Image (cartoon, rainbow, N blue to C red):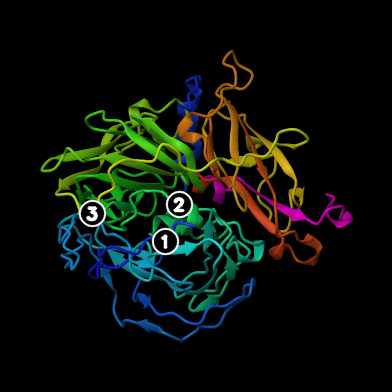
Amino acid sequence: MTSDPIDLSPRARLSPTRLTATHALVGALLLAAACGDDAMSTTDSTTTATTTGTSETSTTDDSTTTGATTDATTTTDATTTTTTTTTGETDSTTGEPAEYGGNIIIPELLQGTDFELVMDEGAHTFTEGGSPSATAGYNGGLLGPTMEWVKGETVSISLTNQMAGDSTTHWHGAHVSPANDGGPHQMLAAGGGNWSPSFEVMNAAATMWYHPHLHEETAAQVLSGLSGFIIVRDDVEAALDLPREYGVDDLPLVLQDKQLDASGVLQMGPPRGNTMTVNGAADAYREVPAQLVRLRLLNGSLEMAYHLEFDDGRSFSVIGNDLGLLEAPASVTSLELAPGERYEIVVDLSGDEGSAVTLRALNTQLPMGVIGGTAPMMAGLEGTDFDVLRLDVLAPTDNAVASLPGSLVAPVIPSEAGATPRSIVMAEAMLPEMGFTLNGEKMDMAVINEYVEENAVEIWTIENTTPIAHPFHIHDIHFHVLDVDPDGDGPMPPQPPEDWQAGPKDTILVPGFGTVRFIGQFTDFANDPQDGIADAAYMYHCHILPHEDGGMMGQFAVCPGSNPNCVP
């Protein structure tokens, strides 16, 4: 993400072709004891590398990791690059309103099939008039550009790590082979290590993201600023009349709480913060047209969930979950967004020209056990209500979308008949160990914890035996939630997902002492782990990143049918 002028000209369209839980007070005590004291650090920065350019499309479906530096089309400044939170003015040649400004940065949109990303330390100013912070980003001082992928095309990515420490980059939500997944096995060496994955885009239209996934270091690297959006397009989504003018009526928004000192400088220790940021800006605001506006909401925070509503109580439409569009728009007045989750919403601002509408987090309404809703042990956002993003409404564009379609994408949900059951239990580690486990185990890079037969349809039951709500994330597949039991064996029966949660997902918040069941199919990319664990292992884990770093993660392999080597 850079502070360069942003091109907001209309982009070509593709061709048409609560969770609730009732818990004992022990939940609040364990929140502070088990989640809030993870120490994280980052190195100071001296340079920021910025990379642009394209190359010929590759048709291979493999990846390469080396410790060598690639010099092609890479330029490195000799001094630290400071990324500010002001977009600046952008000319328009379309006859539409010339400028939609604000203090949030709209990430550069990268299109095509060849992408170059450089991870490096940099600097960024989060508050107006504040001091710059040491940060990290992709192709800039903080966050990263938005990559646009198109289903059916083969994309090639050159990723170079110019940071002082090792890292990885995971394409969160992507259905790719384990070798292309970017998990902890695909490590990039510090000081110029390069990884060049290439794969066919097999996902449906969705809002995905990318971020580091280095074992035991993910939280610190994400907190330092390393995250970016992926927007997947397909013919089905393109045929629908939806807002999709990037940076105008279609905005990618990453919500992250940060701990800032009195000068606005980022503090790397606390995993929960005192300041809400959106796309790197505190006290965030954005000018938008008076029409239907699509907000791609990503919770990129380490631990905190958010209960989101507009300040005037207006309804809005949820049109998509983590990995695709819903069957039909779901009208709501609020939603809850857990770490790692994405929701695409559309808000109607057609009658609001000249006024402002504010998206707020009413975290006092979060259920007991959800991090972000518990009364804070020290000054911070947790357990409070606060503004997230102010939308200043200007004149509409000439090509405004007037209304949403009544139907979006028909769901394809596997049959439960004959599905293989699988159980994952979230629990506190047994002393003297600290933290949390999955099925009684902590992450071991050399161990495959679960074996899944290729093409199998499975129903996973995620049982949470702790008072803390944990967002469960699985790599490789999308799933559909079958039901949520907010109190396990308690008096409240399991309930089907809310309409706004009924689409394809990869992350789901499991209530404290509750259970979630989901169904998914494990197609493609079967590998025998005995041929190399890095080419076979996918992750599943809690997406509270300090929990993940602490070992609340496991590995599964999709195996060729009837392969005896894949029996645990």
Is there CB contact under 8 Å for labels 2 and 1? yes
Name, please, the residue furthest toward the front: 17
Considering the numbered disc 2 on the image, is that residue within a helix, a strand or a loop? helix
Task: Kindly identify which numbered label has been placed on residue 237.
Answer: 2
Q: Height in image: 245 above or below 145?
A: above
Q: How would you rate the neighbour count of disc 2 (Cα within 10 Å): few for under 14, some for 14-19, many for 20 or more?
A: many
Q: Is residue 567 magenta?
A: yes
Disc with the residue nearer the chain's start (2 vs 1): 1
Q: How would you rate the neighbour count of disc 3 (Cα within 10 Å): few for under 14, some for 14-19, many for 20 or more?
A: many
Coordinates of residue 71 in the picture (x, y in percent): 46, 86
Instruction: Name the amino acid type tagged 2.
Output: Glu
Instruction: Name the amino acid type tagged 1.
Output: Leu
Q: Which residue is mark 1?
A: 14
Q: Is residue 286 left or right of residue 451?
A: left
Considering the numbered disc 3 on the image, is that residue within a helix, a strand or a loop? loop
Disc with the residue nearer the chain's start (1 vs 3): 1
Q: Is residue 26 magenta?
A: no
Distance from disc 1 to disc 3, alpha carbons, whole Å, reads: 41 Å
Instruction: Name the amino acid type tagged 3.
Output: Gly
Name, please, the residue furthest toward the left: 354
Distance from disc 2 to disc 1, alpha carbons, whole Å, reads: 9 Å
Coordinates of residue 420 in the picture (x, y in percent): 76, 38
Coordinates of residue 2 in the picture (x, y in percent): 29, 68
Quick one: quadrant of the N terminus? bottom left
Q: Which residues are magenta?
A: 547-568
